[in-house]
Amino acid sequence: MRRHTFRSESGQAMIEMALVLPLLLGLLIAIFEFGILYNNHITLTDATRAGARKAAVARFAGDGGASAVAAVRSAASNLDQSKLGVTVTANWSVPGSDVTVTASYDYSLTVLGMNVASGTLRSTTKERLE
């Protein structure tokens, strides 16, 4: 009985690369998507900070917080405005009371066509009315 031995390993690296490459690409895309999500969170936090500052210094504008909402939407101009929700609460008649600006943004984290995570980013900032 003859025994066949395969000694050539010329295609081994190619097969290993074909098996590992999809995993590496998926990981790279996941890191990229997470970076976008983190950027959206930082943008949302900065936007609520800008809106709270606008509300704190413009309390005599008489608009009931509309200028603060506009400031949040302006500061978050790179986000999808249809997914952005903004609320402003304050006791406008009492100087020194707190104004609270809350913004929410719906997200969906998708990697290679699969929905990995979805939810709502929230950010709240409080400032004292001047």
Image (cartoon, rainbow, N blue to C red):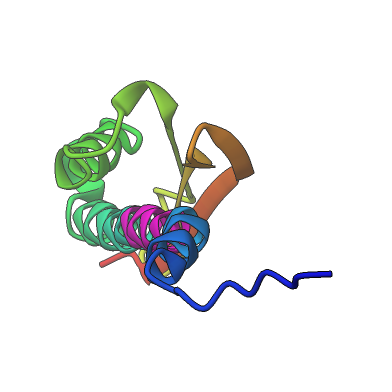
Tell which residue pokes out farthest to the right in this image.
1
- Residue 104 image position (x, y, % from top left): 49, 43
Query: Image height check: is 60 above or below 8?
Result: above
Query: Who is closer to the viewer here, 30 or 2?
Result: 2
Residue 83's image quarter? top left
Query: Who is closer to the viewer here, 89 or 130?
Result: 89
Tell which residue pokes out farthest to the bottom in this image.
7
Question: Which residue shows up at 35% across the image and 34% down it?
Answer: 64
| Main SS of residues in magenta | helix
Could you tell whether 76 is left or right of 37 in the image?
Answer: left
Question: Which residue shows up at 37% across the image and 21% down it?
Answer: 82
- Residue 99 image position (x, y, % from top left): 42, 58
Could you tell whether 74 is left or right of 110 in the image?
Answer: left
Residue 56's image quarter? bottom left
Tell which residue pokes out farthest to the top in this image.
82
- Residue 98 image position (x, y, % from top left): 46, 65
> Where are the magenta residues, as a range?
24-37
* Residue 47 forms part of the magenta stretch: no
Query: Who is closer to the viewer here, 12 or 41?
Result: 12
Tell which residue pokes out farthest to the front in this image.
1
Residue 45's image quarter? bottom left
* Residue 25 forms part of the magenta stretch: yes
- Residue 54 image position (x, y, % from top left): 20, 53
Position of the C terminus by quadrant: bottom left
Position of the N terminus by quadrant: bottom right
Could you tell whether 81 is left or right of 13 in the image?
Answer: left
Query: Who is closer to the viewer here, 31 or 57?
Result: 31
